[in-house]
Amino acid sequence: MSFRALGLPLSPFEPLFALDDAALAARGMRRVTADEKPGYPCRVSLQDAEPGERLILLPFEHQGAHSPYRASGPIFVREAAGAPFDDAGIVPPVLRGRLLSLRAYDAAGFMVDAEVVPGDEIEPVIVRLFACDEVSTIHVHNAKRGCYACRIERA
């Protein structure tokens, strides 16, 4: 089973970098500077920020389906993110070494399965979840803090 991991597009977040801290706070967001690596995983590039890099920490609706599973959660976006990660058959390195929660959704946005797995063991879980024909997408989250990490589709 081939899969494709996808980072978020940068364009919706670009205007946020020009806002001052008060304007970000009014939107429930915060500018942060990475002070260690790993620790600040960008949801566009699917890379950990380097110490000294600036990011925005913000709420993001990652599951917008009209279902009981509609959800949002915190994400980091690097100012220097560039193009979104989009690669078939490759697990983004930012997922390795982290405890992950994989949530499998059908086309209507209903969760049909879920599993918690170490990031170094994610591939067989992706294959198992996609073995169910009902599953159309998998959302990956950091299991400890619940941050949305990325979406995985069938390639």
Image: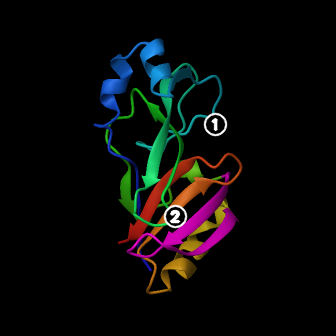
Q: Which residue shows up at 54% across the image and 50% down it?
A: 148
Q: Comparing marks 1 and 2, which lies closer to the viewer?
A: 2
Residue 10, disc: none
| Mark 1 secondary-structure assignment | loop
Q: Is residue 1 left or right of residue 96?
A: left
**Image height of 17 relative to 118, above or below:** above
Is disc 2 placed on a helix, strand or loop? loop
Q: Nearer the viewer, residue 84 or 22?
A: 22
Residue 119 can be seen in this image = no
Q: Main secondary structure of the magenta part?
A: strand
Residue behind mark 2: 69
**Residue 141 percent coordinates (x, y):** 58, 54
Residue position for label 1? 38
Note whether 55 is above or below 130 in the view shown. Answer: above
The residue depicted at 44 percent of the width and 80 percent of the height is 1
- Quarter occupied by residue 134: bottom left
Label 1 to label 2: alpha-carbon separation: 29 Å
- Label tally: 2
Q: Position of residue 105 (x, y in %)?
A: 48, 72
Identified by mark 1, the residue type is Pro
Q: Is residue 54 magenta?
A: no
Q: Which residues are magenta?
A: 97-117
